[in-house]
Image (cartoon, rainbow, N blue to C red):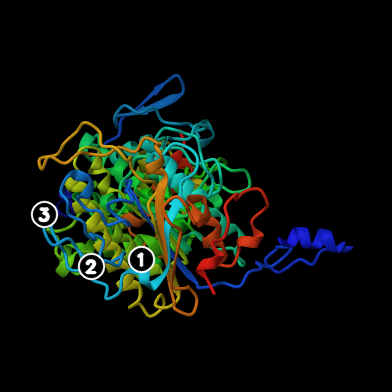
Amino acid sequence: MKRRNFLKKAGITAAAPFILPSGRLFAATGARVVNHVVFVLFAGGIRQQESVDQQYLMNQGGNTAGNIMLNMLEGDAPNNNIIFEQWAPILNQPLANQGAFFKEVLYKNGPTGHYNGHTVAMTGNYTETGLNLNINPEFPTIFEYYRKHSDPARSAINSWWISEGLGPYPSLNYSQHAGYGSLYGANYLRPASLISQAGLNQLGAAVNYQPDDVDRILKIKNMLDRNFSNQANALPGIQNTLNEREMIKTYYLETLQQVLNGSFEWATPNNSLTELTGDLLALSGAWSILDRFTPELTVVNTTNLDICHSNFTGYIDSMHKADFGVGWLWNKIQSHPVLANDTIMICMPEHGRNLVTNNVNDNNGFGAYDHTSDDNSRRLFAMIAGPEDKVVRDEFGTFGNAAAESIDIVPTIAHILGFEEDIPNGLLPGRVLNEAFY
Amino acid sequence: MMFLFSNCKKEIITQNEINNDYTYNIDNEVIYQSNVEKTRQKTPELYISILYSNLFQTTIPANDLSELARIRAATGDKQLADELFLNAFVNGGNAIIPSNNTMRDDVETFIADTYLRFFLRIPTAYEVFELKKEIEADAQLTPELIYQGFALSNEYKFY
């Protein structure tokens, strides 16, 4: 029962509400399950058939089954008709065995497009918008709920949205919703734009200023501002505090240095640059941020397997490599002094793909798949991996009997970080996946 | 004395009075009488373009503008991105910035030039006094740092 309803039913009134030092009427209620959540949107559109069902080439006339996601799923790899570059798994135990595995999750309403799928996953609300619009979503994102309803309220450095590509994704770090918005948004980074020739060209000469010099610059600015009556409007986007902005600037510049001197950690076998994909670069960037700032809430996506619109072979290869990247990320988290055993990782595709191929065959003669809102494209899976004493080891859902919906992730994250009950009624139609936790 | 000054570059500014506005032979910009005339905020693109021109005395190449826009789009805190761009411009070695010695040899000329360069106006007597005091009080306050203060100020974001 939500607190509001309880108070109403109990007839509790007060002449004057008790105001906490933070200015809130009530403290955030729920106890936390852990202090860090990493939500991997294993996105681009994945069919259950090639992932959870491990059907590999069975639907391509190849008569070969097998598990190509060895870090996330239990099962043997295919042993013939290998069309992808096989990488040895990095995890001793797949993620599905390290937590609650929701084998069937339903993307119930709205078009199965990338922007929609991401919006649904990150706001906990279905949307009917059918275009990849670079606009902030209508409903608050998990970042805004986290920052606003945690007590004390959290600054932006504690929440990060990291995307593989640009397009519509930068706008998902906060919403247009009244009472929320950029004030509570997440920091956002697309690593591939920073860690790039463009990044080196444009930022390579920047200096990591000592605090004294930062103060000097600010002193001049403030002096000049006193003599000018207009105040520049805040730029669109989130605003970090002064100190945290300097920390992030330092992170940017040190990251570029690490890339140049070869000390940056890449989510590839043997730290190889040649094996890097867009997804693995995003996951490498996510780790870099987790390692530096240990944010409490991180969302990162992968999208390369959307190549499946025209190239089934590429889709399989991308899926296998993204799976490696997720395993690599979890391995890193579990080796970190702050994050280990205090992090829950949630993995979920943003949507599936169609049951029937389109008319495009790749060089191997395999048919490609779109995602145009058929029933198959509404089938997803979700994994919630975490400490053994916090997250159950169990499986939920079967084909035709989904155990959850994609809108359930946001309330579940809110539950994990202890602020679910503080979210106003009516904003989150989904449910907390309580069966995943002790 | 002649030898000592023979290597100094002195900027010649010719001043023509036209309809009570002053024009200087610096890109034929019209100079503001005062900062109250500045009421419109620059767009982010205009800000970066003008900043580049002010620092490098040339138009920003299209490829650079494109790369900057991409990095900016990839960063949630746009202020952070702009501050890093400014930092890189100033410290990249190609920006036209007087040396610390040149500044301190003639602080008032440096101040006047800096106001003209960034704010397109002559500083008031008080503004000269204020900034001169800061420069003379802090040997570590370099032209690079001062330029960044100007570029980050509210007035610079308006026209």
Q: Number of labelled discs?
A: 3
Which residue is at a point 45% across and 66% down the rendered structure image?
A: A37
Dot in front, 1 or 3:
3
Residue A64: percent from left, percent from top? 17, 54
Residue A21: x percent and y percent?
Answer: 70, 69
The amino acid marked with disc number 3 is Asn
Quadrant for the C terminus of chain A, please.
Answer: bottom right
The answer as to whether the residues below labels 3 and 2 share one chain is: yes
Chain identity of mark 1: B
Real-space CA distance between mark 1 and mark 3, rounded to the nearest whole angstrom: 71 Å
Q: In this view, does A263 lie to the left or right of A49?
A: left
Label placed on residue B139: 1
Whole-number angstrom distance, CA of label 3 to CA of label 2: 32 Å
Query: Which chain is disc 3 placed on?
Result: A
Q: Local crowd at mark 3 within 10 Å, few (<14), some, or many (≥20)?
A: few
**Lower sequence index among marks 3 and 2:** 3
Of the 4 image quadrants, the one containing the N terminus of chain A is bottom right
Amino acid at pointer 1: Ala
Q: Which of B45 and A177 is in front in this view?
A: A177
Image disc number at residue A265: 2
Q: Circle 1: is it few (<14), some (14-19), or many (20+) Cα within 10 Å?
A: few
State which quadrant residue B67 falls in: top left
Q: Is mark 2 on a helix, strand or loop?
A: loop
Q: Please state if A68 lies on the left or on the right of A414 as rendered.
A: left
The picture places residue B49, in percent across and down from the top left corner, at 32, 36
On the image, which quarter does residue B13 sit in? top left
Mark number displayed over residue A81:
3
